[in-house]
Image (cartoon, coloured by chain):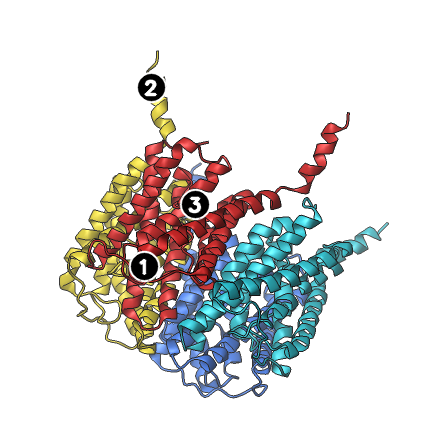
Chain colours: A cyan, B blue, C yellow, D red
Amino acid sequence: MIPYDLPRRAVAEALGTGLLVATVVGSGIMAETLTHDTALALLGNTLATGAMLVVLITILGPVSGAHFNPAVSLVFCLNRSLPPRDLPAYLVAQFAGGIAGTVAAHLMFALPVLEIATKLRTGPAQWFSEVVATFGLVAVILAGLRFERRAAPWLVGLFITAAYWFTASTSFANPAVAVARSLTDSFSGIRPADLPGFIVAELLGALIALALMGWLLRPETIERSEPLKAKP
Amino acid sequence: MIPYDLPRRAVAEALGTGLLVATVVGSGIMAETLTHDTALALLGNTLATGAMLVVLITILGPVSGAHFNPAVSLVFCLNRSLPPRDLPAYLVAQFAGGIAGTVAAHLMFALPVLEIATKLRTGPAQWFSEVVATFGLVAVILAGLRFERRAAPWLVGLFITAAYWFTASTSFANPAVAVARSLTDSFSGIRPADLPGFIVAELLGALIALALMGWLLRPETIERSEPLKAKP
Amino acid sequence: MIPYDLPRRAVAEALGTGLLVATVVGSGIMAETLTHDTALALLGNTLATGAMLVVLITILGPVSGAHFNPAVSLVFCLNRSLPPRDLPAYLVAQFAGGIAGTVAAHLMFALPVLEIATKLRTGPAQWFSEVVATFGLVAVILAGLRFERRAAPWLVGLFITAAYWFTASTSFANPAVAVARSLTDSFSGIRPADLPGFIVAELLGALIALALMGWLLRPETIERSEPLKAKP
Amino acid sequence: MIPYDLPRRAVAEALGTGLLVATVVGSGIMAETLTHDTALALLGNTLATGAMLVVLITILGPVSGAHFNPAVSLVFCLNRSLPPRDLPAYLVAQFAGGIAGTVAAHLMFALPVLEIATKLRTGPAQWFSEVVATFGLVAVILAGLRFERRAAPWLVGLFITAAYWFTASTSFANPAVAVARSLTDSFSGIRPADLPGFIVAELLGALIALALMGWLLRPETIERSEPLKAKP
């Protein structure tokens, strides 16, 4: 069931979250350096992030489950896929790995090790965007694991590809990535003051998905079999 | 055969159509906000829509069949894949879910809840485009389910990716999505007055595909075996 | 082995070549209408063509083999995958289907039914590009069918996606598509006078691929087993 | 285990590296010819390279392992996947094939057969980028072969797609490709004087990946079984 020990799983979570954040932040810096067209910059940012998600979830999923996201780890705790005693190690690995990812991106582009983001991202429309984005992400993960486990990395990568464009917030959908992105003053940054609104919205979206998919994915046949048992 | 009850299937159709429309409308608003180049806007719109279709059909297909489209539900009724008594629930879910998707996109981008589209889309070239687009979509679905059921979500996503570019109408190919898009005055909108032409063309394309693929996909061996049965 | 009769296979070849050409020509018209940036136009053209190839080869491959290309049908004749008596029907279907595809694209964009292309594509660099493009295409098909039959549609779609960009000719690699593209005076056109150079180069590239891959894909073990047979 | 003889494997390595370099260099030339927007040029370059990697690794992997990269061949020597006596043939094939790829790209675009690149790529940020890029590439290959062998071509193509954007060096990650790119004075070139820094960084990244993944991918169960063996 869980063939890898906690240190290895925690390293996998840190490595995965780190490479994910390095991709998000690094491709944002590359894109805004190369063009003045913001749609084109978002396209480069999207392509890199979506591709990297497929890769990281495929290669690290068998080790740690490839959450890379405190909202996802929380959901897996609640539906008993992750033992609660492992949750602190996962969360520490995700937040620390995410910040290391920002550092790596900054070093690759010869920027200061860490910065304070000044990009304003707040207000009800942004928060609602994050609810929708994280709802969708968690719904995709829960249904994907149920019906097409091996396609799950693709589903997550494709969902985020779409969500970068159809949500007004470009879909952070991840508290650890949001914190890491508050430490870069570039294309993908977010003001530290705007973090609480984003994180609350993300957790809310995750919980709604857990509740709705819990009902939706329970097949009729289970319900029908209950009266059968009561027959004799 | 149909393990999920009708309420769950209807919710799946509404959720899927809603997220699809939110993606089409939302990514269109995002794109036209970020760039003045219409090709680039269409590229962002295409990428998001194609990616989301793969995701939604994969995760909701096992629940409801993932039609998200009255033309597809009609075809599945005609070829006996969907019981006619379920059709009304599917259609209501698709139209209602689609409109909810426009509302969600507008709320995410801080626009009025609903608008009346002013974008003109009419004339024989547009109608012929919709015939071709829906013909292709239904042909892809019927042949995909026949030969590569598990690849069907990818085939639909890739077909629509191509059809956004090779048809003059950018391939609506879906009456419920068309109605939902008449309620946004943005990149992906369509004047309500232009809906009837689009919907008639879409149904026509779907029926042509049903007829042609019904003949094309019937293998020679079946025909040859008929005289054999008549032999003695 | 060949469960579908020749009429169905010919219709599949015509339908597939037609939709492929409609995609190439239509997306080219759409792209040059929407932007003045030629790289962006080529990007839209590439995305649509690559996506459509994956779809068409997946859904029509089980019927006709999904050649859609006289150079490919010729190679399959030479390596005994296609009975020579079926070749004329395949070629007629491909050339007729291709021209119908140009007509369909023109009708969708309200252009004259057929035009004479004026786009100049000639000279040794263009011809060498077509040799490389068709060599690559046929090599990919032969090795793909050998090692990963079910991935073959993806391999062809991805190879053409790359070849649109890395060859100076944007990789026609298909005599039937080349003829159909000589009848549109738009982004993807080619002067009729330039067709012979392209077609000769394409057939040459296909034959080189057949020869090289015939040697390369024959494993060592087969050669080693020959002396064994000669032992006693 | 190794059904193909060394000549065939060497030809596969040369052919693959050649087509890869022709794609990288050729699509770079095409892109900078068509647009003045560097982000758009990188997008065309990325799309072609990522797509071609998936194709080449799928079709040549069963013949030679599809390294196309001296750093990868070295890693496979160190972890005993490639017999050391085969290494020289692999390296010669990769460097020679790579240079032939530059020649092919130049001939397709009517440029001089070979040029000396003048594009400056040096400094700690560039070198660190190459360490990260090659670390990631080798980690993806090792974990991909371990968990999802058939998806490995996709993982490599997607990783490089992301790495073109998230590293400041656009991710060469390959000494043979780097040398071949020093012979073109176009979009993808690199000054010969900058090669040593890149190659040292690439080998360093590859060795770090070999060490880290060697630890990370060893499951806990193996360690637990060791005391069991020592029991009696």
Could you tell me how far apart the alpha carbons at marks 1 and 3 are, in whole angstroms?
Answer: 20 Å
**Disc marking residue D60:** none
- The amino acid sitting under disc 3 is Ala
Identify which residue, B4 or A57, lies in the foreground: A57
Element carrying mark 3: helix
Element carrying mark 2: helix
Residue position marked by numbered label 2 in the rendering: C227
**Disc marking residue D189:** 1
Q: Position of residue A22 (x, y in %)?
A: 54, 63
Q: Looking at the rendering, in which quadrant would you find the C terminus of chain D?
A: top right
Chain bearing tag 1 is D
- Mark 3 crowd level (few <14, some 14–19, many ≥20, 10 Å Cα): many
Residue position marked by numbered label 3 in the rendering: D71
Outermost residue toward the left? Answer: C193
Tag 2–tag 3 contact (CB < 8 Å)? no
Q: Position of residue A99 (x, y in %)?
A: 61, 64
